[in-house]
């Protein structure tokens, strides 16, 4: 989504926007134009990716750097393990990188209090490792 001289530009793959989506975009156009004008370009570029289901992100996603207020470093969200090489070569520790599969495992745990998510992120960062399995309690 972008704004250009009062026009709202929404890019989506063919056939993905429904009539209801278009109607909602028209209804929210003034707010969307304001947000597009206020949103830094890198954030605007990430919005379509952040709204993807994880399966689609895994198929065609990008490398996303994410800052959270409760960690002293940024985190990276990547589609798959094959995407790690670029970041590891740049010196990014494995503990800072979350693959779509790792995120899917985390989401599969059901209700996650914020403190549990923070604890898991801190543990992954401290261990600088991969999450290889997530098991629910029996």
Image (tube, rainbow, N blue to C red):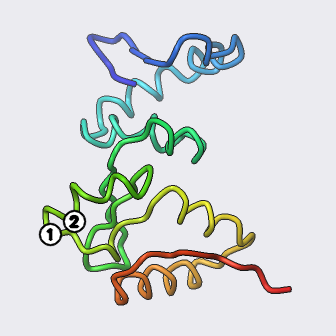
Mark 2 highlights which residue? 88
Q: Residue at 44% x, 88% y: name it.
A: 123
Mark 1 highlights which residue? 91
Q: Is residue 53 left or right of residue 36?
A: right
Q: CA distance from mark 2 to mark 1?
A: 5 Å
Name the secondary structure under disc 2.
Answer: helix
Name the secondary structure under disc 1.
Answer: loop
Image: 80 above or below 135: above
The image quadrant that residue 133 belongs to is bottom right
Q: Residue at 50% x, 38% y: name it.
A: 59
Q: Residues within 10 Å of mark 2 (few under 14, many from 20)?
A: few
**105, 120: nearer the viewer:** 105
What percent of the width, then of the height, locates residue 50? 48, 44
The image quadrant that residue 1 belongs to is top left
Query: Which circle marks residue 104 in the picture?
Result: none
Quadrant where the C terminus is found in the figure: bottom right
Q: Residues within 10 Å of mark 1 (few under 14, many from 20)?
A: few
Q: Residue furthest left?
A: 90
Q: Residue furthest right?
A: 138
Give yes or no for contact between labels 2 and 1 (Cβ–Cβ under 8 Å): yes
What percent of the width, then of the height, locates residue 37? 29, 30
What percent of the width, then of the height, locates residue 102? 53, 65
Q: Residue at 57% x, 19% y: name it.
A: 25
């Amino acid at each position: 989504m972008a704004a250009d001289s009062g026009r709202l530009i929404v890019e989506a793959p063919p056939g993905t926007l429904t009539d209801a989506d278009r109607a909602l975009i028209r209804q929210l156009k003034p707010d969307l134009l304001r947000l597009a004008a206020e949103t830094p370009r890198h954030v605007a570029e990430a919005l379509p990716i952040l709204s993807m289901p994880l399966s689609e992100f895994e198929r065609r996603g990008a490398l996303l750097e994410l800052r959270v207020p409760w960690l002293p470093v940024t985190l990276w969200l990547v589609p798959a393990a094959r995407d790690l090489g670029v970041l590891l070569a740049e010196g990014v520790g494995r503990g800072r990188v979350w693959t779509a599969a790792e995120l899917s495992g985390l989401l599969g745990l059901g209700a996650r209090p914020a403190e549990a998510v923070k604890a898991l992120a801190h543990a992954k960062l401290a261990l600088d490792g991969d999450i290889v399995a997530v098991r629910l309690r029996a």
